[in-house]
Amino acid sequence: MLSLLCVLSSALGDESPGRKAPIADTHSHFKWNQEDVTPAEEVARILAENEIVLAVIIGTPAGLALELQRIAGDRVVPFYSPYRLPGDWNSWYHDRGLPGRLREALVSGRYQGVGELHLIGGFAPDWRTPVISQVLRISREFALPVLLHTEFSRADYLLELCRANPGNRLIWAHAGGILTALEVRRVLQSCAQVWVDLSARDPWRYVRNPIVSADARLLPEWRRLLIDYPDRFIVGADAVWPVEQLDAWDEADTGWQEYARFMDFHRSWLARLPAPVGRKIRLENALRLFGRSADPDVD
């Protein structure tokens, strides 16, 4: 781990002293326990300093994403999150009131996506249950992407869900978290409507099946996968910290203070891909996913 961190620092030191490469962050949070340590004004500054062209923000509660957009402007893409109380991440699909709240939120026209929705092995019910089915149907009705977080030893759960819901655009958080490149390839081969988010697949979070080697280079199987499917991958910070606990409601989350290292990790391995592939994953795929035009001055 130490050698990887040293290589990352060295690679990032090779950047020109000027502007960082513009990048899209397709997975970050702004939560109740982040706001106290990193207020919205500071988050907006962090996004600007890190040359973030587009930032998907998941508010918890949902309105925090709208508050950040008010301050940071149109670079923020607010997602509607159903999480309001401790434990919602592993019980949201039992909330019969959620579909009504979701519809009301989307009718407002202020949200541009839905999620992050956790469907994790050991907790996840059949995705055909009423609440999950309604959430997918409402999101499809409003033509908005859904950010899904699955964690299983194989990709079968997501494969079944995406095949049965071809009209839903799905963002697959963390490329399945613990899954190998081979399992991710199975999804890409079968589900044309899935975008694979590589947030948190860094040396500090999902380390069970890394995407980079000890010298900070993409592992061969991941490099082949990215080159084979250059239009289907996106990156993000998933700005939460520390990572030992999931949504510790009684403790501060300092993820936004760690933001630069999360995004610079992506810049380091993206820079080693063929330039057209790297640019797609760094920026163009996210702009296309959210119907944004590229600024001619953004490279």
Image (spheres, helix red, strand yellow):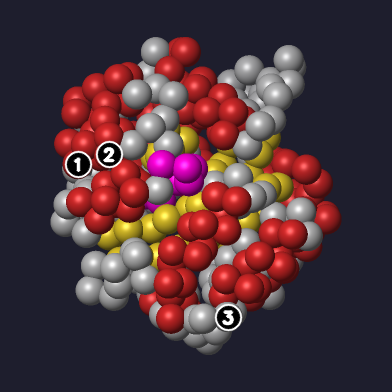
Residues at marks 2 and 3, CA–CA distance in whole angstroms: 31 Å
The structure residue drawn at horizontal position 55% and vertical position 50%, both measured from the top left corner, is 140
Foreground pick, 170 / 246: 170
Query: Does residue 265 show up magenta in the picture?
Result: no
Q: Residues at badges 2 and 1 in contact (C-beta under 8 Å)?
A: yes
Amino acid type assigned to the residue bearing label 1 in the image: Glu
- Element type at mark 2: helix
- Closest to the camera, between mark 1 and mark 3, is 3
- Closest to the camera, between mark 2 and mark 1, is 2
Instruction: Answer whether residue 32 is visible to the viewer in this image.
Output: yes
Q: Which mark, residue 187?
A: 2
Q: Left or right of 260: which side holds 69? A: right
Does residue 282 sit above or below 117 in this rendering? Answer: above
Residues at marks 2 and 1, CA–CA distance in whole angstroms: 7 Å
- Element type at mark 3: loop
Marked residue nearer the N-terminal end (2 or 3):
3
Amino acid type assigned to the residue bearing label 2 in the image: Val
Marked residue nearer the N-terminal end (1 or 3):
3
Foreground pick, 103 / 216: 103
The structure residue drawn at horizontal position 48% and vertical position 53%, both measured from the top left corner, is 147
Foreground pick, 264 / 230: 230
Q: Residues within 10 Å of mark 2 (few under 14, many from 20)?
A: many
- Closest to the camera, between mark 2 and mark 3, is 3
What residue would you read off at disc 1?
A: 183
The structure residue drawn at horizontal position 83% and vertical position 55%, both measured from the top left corner, is 70
Instruction: Answer whether residue 271 is visible to the viewer in this image.
Output: no
Give the magenta-colored segment's residue range: 166-174
What residue would you read off at disc 3?
A: 97
Q: Quadrant of residue 8?
A: top left
